[in-house]
Amino acid sequence: MPLIGDLLSHTLSPLLSRAIWPLMMTKSFGPQSVPKKFEAFPKEMALRPSQIRASAAESALMVPDAFKFRNRYADLRMPVVIITGEQDRLIDIDTQSARLHSEIPQSRFHRVAGNGHMIQQTATDQVMSGILEVAGGPTKLEAAE
């Protein structure tokens, strides 16, 4: 059976991944379009069999780990900012992000209108302002010179 799995992971899986890449990007970035700067992303590297396996393993561990530590969120003492795209198509921000905010007393929660899951790419200024907000820096980004 491992031989079949290896064969599929090196033939079918990369082909299917390449075929659905545009749909994954639309779902991840929506409602915004994929930014031009992201066109340079090395999708060939992300779609290698070893990377697909690593991503699958990481995803499989994420939920149990979050579940394991869910009762400890209130113990966090560092500044926390939670920044979400208001139109996130991958997670339900009311049941996940807003709930997390309610469980971390000192957290700050920002919903970025008109953005989806990949706000670090589509709303970079707002994300950086949120980071600076909890880091004690100025909350407005100044244009680079």
Image (cartoon, rainbow, N blue to C red):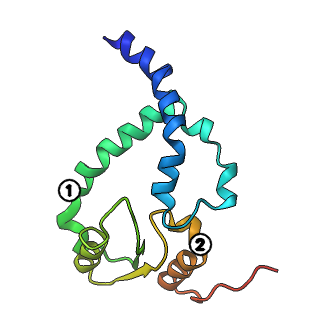
Mark 1 residue element? helix
Distance from label 2 to label 1 (Cα)?
A: 29 Å
Residue tagged 2: 124
Label ID, residue 30: none
Q: Relative to the observer, which residue lies in front, 11 or 143?
A: 11
Quarter that holds the C terminus: bottom right
Q: Residue at x 50, y 19 (%)?
A: 11
* Percent of width and height locating residue 65: 26, 51
* Quarter-of-image position of residue 44: top right
Amino acid type at mark 1: Phe
* Percent of width and height locating residue 59: 35, 45
- Is there CB contact under 8 Å for labels 2 and 1? no
Dot 1, crowdedness within 10 Å: few (<14), some or many (≥20)? few
Q: Is residue 95 left or right of residue 85?
A: left
Looking at the image, residue 34 lies above or below residue 119: above
Q: Is residue 75 left or right of residue 33?
A: left
Mark 2 residue element? helix
Amino acid type at mark 2: Thr
Dot 2, crowdedness within 10 Å: few (<14), some or many (≥20)? few
* Percent of width and height locating residue 35: 64, 62
* Quarter-of-image position of residue 120: bottom right
Q: Residue at x 49, y 40 (%)?
A: 20
Residue tagged 1: 67
